[in-house]
Amino acid sequence: MAGRFVRASKYRHVFGRGTKKEQCYDNLRISTNAWDTNLIKANPEYLSVNWESSGGGAFAVIPLSEKGRVPEQIPLFRGHTAAVLDTDWSPFNDSLISSASDDGKVFIWKVPDNFTVWTDADEPADVAPVARLSGHMRKVGHVLFNPAAENVLASSSGDYTVKIWDVEAGGAKLTLKHKDIVQSLSWSADGSLLVTTSRDKKLRVWDVRQEKPAHEVAGHPGAKSSRSVWLGEHDRIATTGFSRMSDRQLGLWDMRNPAEPIGGFQVLDSISGVCMPFWDDGTQCLYLAGKGDGNIRYYEFANDKFEYLSEYQSPDPQRGIAFLPKRGINLHENEVLRCFKTVKDGYVEPISFIVPRRSEMFQSDIFPPCTGINAGTTAAEWFGGKTALPPKISLESVYDGGAPEEVPTEYKPASAFTPIQSPPPTKVEAPKPAPQAAPVASREPPPSLKDNKQSLASQASKFADKDAEESDDDASSFEEVPKPVQRPTVTAARQEEKTRGPVITKEPEPTPTPTAAPAKASPPAETTPAPTAAPGGAAGAAAGIKDHLTDIKSTLLHQNKILSDQSDQIALLMREVNQLKTKVGTQSSDREKDERIRELELELEEARS
């Protein structure tokens, strides 16, 4: 039954639900660039798609409400002179987006008000960037906004650097120098630390404002690309990569001591596609989507390990995938997460992950507070050294269409240290009631006398034909009656062979009862019972003891006889062995004689045992 045990979890039955083709975002020209990126990004209002275009790079922005087949000509966000490699939405402004390009530039864009892909113009007007950030010497592969500070952006480039931009000022304030191309980057929840994976197979945790790595350790040993993601407000990092045998791996790292992954690398499968990790802080689940396969696995993080929950399977492989922020999900359908996957480079399919429940009320246990649209700090405060988590909102406040309400922020990593220190005070106070056990040691002797009398009387009845329950003195006189039944002394007498059996039986006789020595009528034994005036019950007990001693004597005599017979047999065997040895003499030993001698020796050993 132990093998059938199932771990309790609120998300054990979460399932993924696909979308019909009519409700997807169809007729798209998704970029076919070979750079390792997610291709699409999403927020509660819009979906950005790296576009396959000529005459420079571009990407498209599609409102989530405009499902179905998009027009042949749609307004694009143009401005780069080479292919767009990555985009990222601002976590605090749903209309602000950044882009990275093969031309080495980082652009900031503002989605126009009431933006739509449907227009009556023959050639829709393209959208121009509102800010251009220059500083990288080679192509820019990734961009990522800070999750706690407003308008702070990180970008990684082929020049082996990661630059931290102040979008408001329009310049790079910090530079993190690597030794090879950066393959992925992820911010901590408070925006003070940044984890990166590089082509040199190193995992680095950066103290960003110090511009130096706090930790640098060996990551996945495989030659293919690896990814990393910070587990929200935990001080843990998840990475995906490959082994030397090209097996896909999953690793969990302790940010405080990342020398080795916790529990080693977990082998997933042998598929060659890069595994893209995504963390959901609300459900404490990690989602893994592989490039080139249509499956999305999800694990629950508990007790410093990933517990496998289930897997969404689809025959359509994906090249890119994006997950929606928590404030954009459908609460009425118990949707805990929603993602968008590219299919055949032609359309994007939404996938909803749902907890199956029949209740139509707000489910507070699966919808904890989530990050809102207000930042924890401004860009100037963050570069000045301030660190703060963004305020969270209650999803229950928006369940019925109301305005989001902020709730106090509880920083989980701090609580990870406090439980270790908080129990000692409670443990110090707990032993205080322990000295109260001292009165129990007294056991209240006065009330227990009657119980002792009854128990002693029951012990005396084992050796008597009648019950001795008449007087307290009689009961106390048989207090040590069980002592004559000392089997270890009898066995010792057996091992010492002869005549010690009667001597052993004499020693316990005077101690329990003076009348227990009728075997040898010694005068002192007869004078002692006179003052006690033992009744008939005592006489019956004495008779029982006498019979018992007689049985012991007969047993000892029988054992002594057996021992004498065995000793005689041993002497005969020894004599026969000696005779055979003398017959053999110096002659060569015959096989039959040796076997006979061996048999006799074995019999001799058995007889001795």
Image (spheres, rainbow, N blue to C red):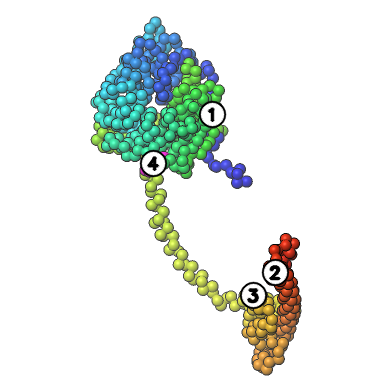
Asked whether the beta carbons under mark 4 and mark 1 sit within 8 Å of each other, the answer is no
Q: Amino acid at mark 4?
A: Pro
Please state the horizontal and vertical placement of residue 146, each as a whole percent of the image. 33, 31
Query: Which residue was labeled with disc 2?
Result: 585
| Closer mark to the observer between disc 1 and disc 3 | 3
Task: Count the labels in the image.
Answer: 4
| Closer mark to the observer between disc 2 and disc 4 | 2
Instruction: State the residue at coordinates (35%, 13%).
Output: 56
At label 2, counting other C-alpha atoms closer than 10 Å, the crowd grade (few under 14, some 14-19, many 20 or more) is few
Q: Nearer the viewer, residue 164 or 464?
A: 164
Asked whether the beta carbons under mark 2 and mark 1 sit within 8 Å of each other, the answer is no
Of labels 2 and 4, earlier in sequence is 4
Query: Which residue was labeled with disc 1?
Result: 312
Horizontal relation, residue 5 to residue 337: left or right: right
Of labels 2 and 3, earlier in sequence is 3
Q: Secondary structure at mark 3?
A: helix
Instruction: State the residue at coordinates (69%, 71%).
Output: 608
Q: Secondary structure at mark 4?
A: loop
Q: Quadrant of the C terminus?
A: bottom right
Q: Which mark is residue 488?
A: 3
Query: Which residue was labeled with disc 4?
Result: 258
**Magenta segment boundaries in residue numbering:** 253-259
State how far apart marks 4 and 1 are (Cα). 31 Å
Q: Secondary structure at mark 1?
A: strand
Of labels 4 and 1, earlier in sequence is 4
Horizontal relation, residue 464 to residue 267: left or right: right
Residue 272, placed above or below residue 445: above
Please state the horizontal and vertical placement of residue 102, each as a whole percent of the image. 34, 19
Please state the horizontal and vertical placement of residue 267, each as a whole percent of the image. 50, 35
